Image (spheres, rainbow, N blue to C red):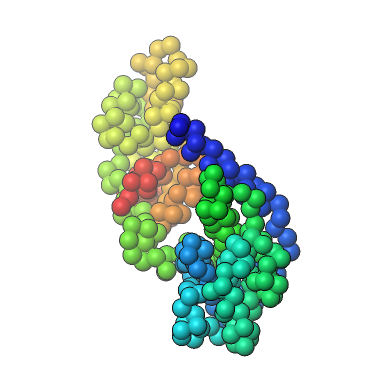
Amino acid sequence: MDFVKRSQEVFQTEISELAKLKNTIGTEMSQLVRLILQSKGKVVFTGIGKTGLIGRKISSTLTSTGTPSVFMNAAEALHGDLGIIGYDDVLIAISNSGSSQEILNVIEPIKKIGCTLVAMTGDVNSELAKKADIVINIGVEQEASNLNFVPMCSTTAALVMGDALAVCLLESRGFKSDDFEKTHPGGALGKKLSARVKDCMYQQVPKVQQTTLFKDIIYEVSNMRQGITMVYKDDVAIGIITDGDIRRAVQKYDDVKSLTAADIMTFGFKSILPDTKISEAFRMMNENKITSLAVVESDKNNAEIIGVLHIHNIIDFK
């Protein structure tokens, strides 16, 4: 077997199934999003086996992005776990077949509690779908392996539908990176979200005067290893030279020996304050299609440059 080719075929099968499923999404998604946004309770996911694992992931995603959610194992529901469900909650039951007995067993108790029942199923005519208040179709035509009964495309479909729901909810709530930071204070992600420019910037600032010759510019850029140098007129920064500017000068001029910083610099530069979050710095770089920012002491005109932030500082920050 050609394992590379077979792996590519699996990818293509799952992509194709997702593309077909995308076109089946209708007003039921809008109905579900509005229901959750208006709900005074939480979102409870339930499932069994592999769909249970998917339910746990979707629930975790919602919780971390502004929508309180928990997971309830369908097999444990009738043994006390139903107690986590309240009248104002929205229960989303995930079952590809819509006929998993463990999930069907909780329908009547759920109806007695009075919460809304949502079926996320691959069979919109199943018993689960018929008893649900809202039905989200996650049906696929085939799984990825020759053993067509092994859940692959179907679990991927449920996962992506859950991601779609999460995006609709977080964007509707106006959920921002600051909100995400509050729920992720620990680990590498939490550290990166809370980090400030001053935490990862270069503190040494490459400097040349506008009259500095080309060979000395190259030395400063290379010696400081930041890919840029600031250009000064006396004590005031007036521009910037990047390694890209140097390459373009070499291509443009036959004789670069007599060139000065003023000949190849970009007048003006983008700056940022040291207490700014690095997520904002990254946004600024993307928006302006640049890779470096001058870090200034204050937002006053001609404020002292106290550091340089390169995109690699952000990417490599741990």
Indicate left or right for 262 with 26 as reference: left
Q: Residue at x 36, y 53 (%)?
A: 197
Q: Residue at x 68, y 67 (%)?
A: 126
Question: Residue 114, position in %: x, y?
Answer: 63, 86
Q: Residue at x 67, y 74 (%)?
A: 132
Question: Residue 199, position in %: x, y?
Answer: 31, 54
Q: Is residue 256 above or below residue 29?
A: above
Inspect this view and state whether residue 141 appears: yes
Task: Name the outermost residue toward the bottom.
Answer: 112
Inspect this view and state whether residue 172 appears: no
Q: Is residue 142 above or below residue 49?
A: above
Q: Residue at x 25, y 31 (%)?
A: 223
Foreground residue among 12 and 31: 12
Q: Is residue 213 above or below residue 18?
A: above
Question: Residue 163, position in %: x, y?
Answer: 56, 59
Foreground residue among 51 and 100: 100
The quadrant of the picture occupied by the N terminus is top left
Task: Name the outermost residue toward the right.
Answer: 27
Task: Name the outermost residue toward the top.
Answer: 254
Indicate left or right for 160 with 177 as reference: right
Q: Quadrant of residue 248?
A: top left
Foreground residue among 179 and 18: 18
Q: How many marks can you see?
A: 0
